[in-house]
Amino acid sequence: MAEIQDIFREYGTAYQEQHKLPRHVLKAMRGIEYCRTSELGYHADVCDDCGNVLYFSYNSCRNRHCPKCQTLPKERWIDNQKHSLLNIGYFHVVFTIPDTLNTLVFQNQNIIYNVLFKSVAETLQELASNKKYLGAELGFTSILHTWGQNLMHHPHIHCIVPGGGISATGRWVESCKKFFIPVKVLSRKFRGKFLHHLKQAELSLRGKLYDLNDSVKWGNFLSDLYSKEWVVYCKPPFRDAACVVEYLGRYTHRVAISNSRILRVENGIVSFKWRDYKDKNRCKVMNLFADEFIRRFIIHILPPRFVKIRHYGLLGNRNKNTKLALCKKLTNTPNLQREKASSFDLIQKIISNDVSTCPCCGSQQRSRIVSFYDSA
């Protein structure tokens, strides 16, 4: 089966020679190319009692854009978040910006992605605090995605929002079953917030389409954005907290495209599966030249140290020991004290096999051997 690693190994060097790429993009490409190969060395777990090799594996690159390296971090993140879940319904809300902003966003990623997070957070918090809709403080998790099914640039934020919050008097306020804020209200508030912060941002863009030195062109561009209806979508609520956990896992550590979607790589053409949401959600096959596939993939490599998963309100770090504990009490959520799962426990859950015990002698005493070598 073809993988992104195979594409980078065969066509990545030529692409890098033809295009000047930022250092963090080169680092991500190199990590994906070498992931779980001899270039990164290997490690082996050996039983101390009988000497049997329990586990042998090439080291992974651990890059957050690598499709091979997300399963264990995803399980670890989910395990850490379980204690924050409440015994209530949750909603999935998606905030999307118009595609006319894509060029501007791509050339100012760090700035505008932060504007996107800030606008979404302020939209939800201000509307939820309004007594007309909920009149309470929210807690929610926001996750940035930058791609569509066809790998084109499509920045949007997924929010997992509990159906309620804490009022100023310290009581729990339940939302309605569908959602406590109408979608059109969310959309227009979000549009206003985003464009307000966009005008305040210090952008470094140069180009004919968005000439920041030409106030008339820039003003016309903003006017067009104000006149459009922005897309905000609210999915039906989850059945219970367990469903929220599984759903979070599918979104938090997802990369632009998984290896399972790639069908073949032949004669410089990459074929992969994608869903066309504009055509009744039909599954189709897209064929791209390898250079174009690489270009689309690296669009979604985030700036260094950029945080793509953020918690707000009741789920913020400063509120977890106070307001979140009150929320659990008000919603009758058990406050279970438990230790974090070890890496062995998480690996065992992933592969459904006992990796802690030696199959030969039954011992759980092991030593790790680490080695680095060059395949050449």
Image: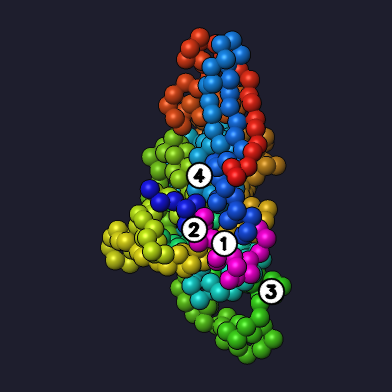
Distance Cα–Cα, label 4 vs label 1 = 21 Å
Above or below for 20 versus 325: below
Above or below for 304 versus 175: below
Which residue is identified by label 1?
A: 13
Q: Residue at x 54, y 33 (%)?
A: 57
Say if residue 328 shows up in the picture. Answer: no
Q: Residue at x 57, y 48 (%)?
A: 34
Mark 3 or 2: in front is 2
Residue flagged by tag 2: what amino acid is it? Glu
Q: Which mark is residue 68?
A: 4
Earlier sequence position, callout 4 versus callout 1: 1
Mark 4 or 1: in front is 1
Earlier sequence position, callout 1 versus callout 3: 1
The magenta-colored residue range is 8-24
Distance Cα–Cα, label 3 vs label 4 = 35 Å
Element under disc 3: loop
Earlier sequence position, callout 3 versus callout 4: 4
